[in-house]
Image (cartoon, coloured by chain):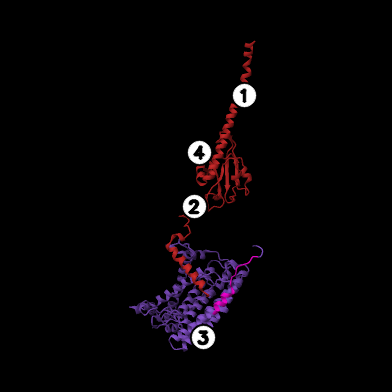
Amino acid sequence: MTEALDQIFVTLKHWLVSLCPAEFQVLASIVLSVAPILMVFPGLFALVTVIERKGLGRIQNRYGPNRVGPFGFLQFVADGIKALIKEDVVPRRADKVIHFLAPLALVLPCVVVYAVLPFGRNMTLTELDAGLLFFFAVGASTELAVFMAGWSSRNKYSLFGAMRAIAQMISYEIPLILSAVSVVMIAGSLSLPKIVAAQGTYGGWLPDWFVFTPWGLAGFLLFMIAASAESNRAPFDLPEGESEIIAGYYIEYSGFKFALFFLGEYLGLFAISGLAITLFLGGWNAPLESLAWIPSWAWFFTKLIALILLFIWTRGTLPRLRQDQLMNFAWKFMLPLTLINLVAAALWHYIPAGFTRWFMCGLMVVGPYCLLGRGIAGKDKTSKRVYRFAD
Amino acid sequence: MLGEGIIKGMGETARNFLGSYVSKKRLTTLQYPEERAPQFPNARQFPFLVYDGEDPEQGLRCVSCQICEKECPPKCIYIVKSKDKRVDYKGQMQFYPATFNIDISVCMSCQICVEVCPFESIKMDTEFELSSTDRFAGLLVRKPQLAKSNDHYRKIHPHDAAESDAALAAEVAKVQAKAKADAEAKAKAAAAKVAPAAPPPEATLAK
């Protein structure tokens, strides 16, 4: 029974494919694998926009959208209709072809990366041996789309926004990948289903997820920080700093093209959250062996929604960084920490299991964090401002 | 240590988030069309014309002196003076406005018309839900819509209405006193006119 429920989508797909004539079975298999991804994640995007607005509202002690549909949950329909019927303005001097292609070039990689994510047991679209590499390679190409958008609009604000976005994304790409490399070192594979399988055992009172190790916890936190910078989420939303450069690289986009940028941003966020789950939070594995009867895909989506809520929570809490703080944070704090974390992961691999391993690795993570953190925090020591003439 | 502030801030926002579901006091937002904020005593939007009594046409205080039309900075008031005269609240014969239009798309709510009006007849209203699908005719307010009773004014601006009523009462009292004095003077004059005529018979009697 549990087995059937767990594999319900897989068996459903095989059954539907078997109904097709033999010459169409390959095509049907492809369509039936891709279509659910193209339906579920944009649907999740629609839901998350409402949840985000309501959550941010509650954080700021107001209601948020509550007019359209029950408790305002159909707000996304109104937003979608608005985006569809809005005039699509293209600046006269813009490079029209690139201006048109940029939103598509942003959304496409954000969708393609879902191909390698394991959503559940036997529920990976393509089981690439180098799935992690594929994810980062395709995910990094969104930077090109961002620059296409900024450049083709022929607007200095959008160009500024694009330059900021590029600088930020390239800077944070390095800690993002390096923190994932520690997982690859321990799991010994770039294949995401294999990384999930490596976390599938239960020892003691905690599951063998990588987040429950010192290097894994540090790696997870660093990965999440870099991921929020990579998907331009607050507190790293400098590319669209409203007070300085208005909407950044998508300032000249209106109507549905703007909605596509929005969609791409959120799809990227979900994808990278899914990757964080796969790498550190045990993928589709249940947290306790006694809870393994709940289907694997349900665990994946529960964890995904939990991470999305975490992103919304941080967005509602933290103020935006300044550009120099952003760069300092990436290069002087996160990069050294990820490099040290690699050594900690290596130590974890070589020292036999026990207290020594925990102590050594924990020290290697906490020590540099405190020292580097003091270096970052010490710079902005505030003192009482002295006024020469006003007093 | 780095990150302490972040954790503290996350706790604060979590408290806000959960607290907003528990205590209604945290939510300062009013659900506008259903709930309304109490109006401030000095709230003002666009001018209206005050009338006394029951009939908006007959009781209109405006005597069509056109001072407000001349003083209006954006020139949004349009008045046509009547050909005939009628009795006003003081019992005097006065003109009245045959047409009185205010273009509230032009009006800037400066209240100068109210300040210059010597007859307490134009005042500021608090009505603000005036959106219209017709931006020309829909925002040109004519005399029937402009005329509102003094009771309405007392309701929206009690303090100012009391002052205005007192000023009007004083005005009426002055007019009546003057009329009385005039009448007395007239009577005296008449008496004086009669008096010189009377003595001759006395004189004749005296003789």
Mark 2 vs mark 1, CA separation in Å = 59 Å
Mark 2 vs mark 4, CA separation in Å = 28 Å
Amino acid under disc 1: Ala
Q: Secondary structure at mark 3?
A: helix
Pointers 2 and 1 within a single chain: yes
Identify the image quadrant of residue B94: top right
User: Quick check: A144 left or right of A280?
Assistant: right
Residue under the image location 61 percent in, 23 percent down: B190
Circle 4 chain: B
Residue at label 4? B53
Q: Which chain is purple?
A: A
Pointers 3 and 4 within a single chain: no
User: Quick check: B194 left or right of A312?
Assistant: right
Other-residue count near label 1 (Cα within 10 Å), few / some / many at <14 / 14–19 / ≥20: few
Q: Secondary structure at mark 1?
A: helix
Residue at label 1? B189
**How far across and how far down the image is residue B198, in percent?**
61, 16
Residues drawn in magenta: A371-387
Mark 3 vs mark 4, CA separation in Å = 92 Å
Q: Secondary structure at mark 4?
A: loop
Q: Nearer the viewer, residue A186 or A49?
A: A186
Mark 2 vs mark 3, CA separation in Å = 65 Å
**How far across and how far down the image is residue A191, in percent?**
46, 84
Q: Residue furthest top?
A: B207
Pointers 2 and 4 within a single chain: yes
Q: Which chain is red?
A: B
Split into 4 quadrants, where in the image is the C terminus of chain B?
top right
Pointers 1 and 4 within a single chain: yes
Residue at label 2? B38
Amino acid under disc 3: Val
- Name which of mark 1 and mark 4 comes first in the sequence: 4
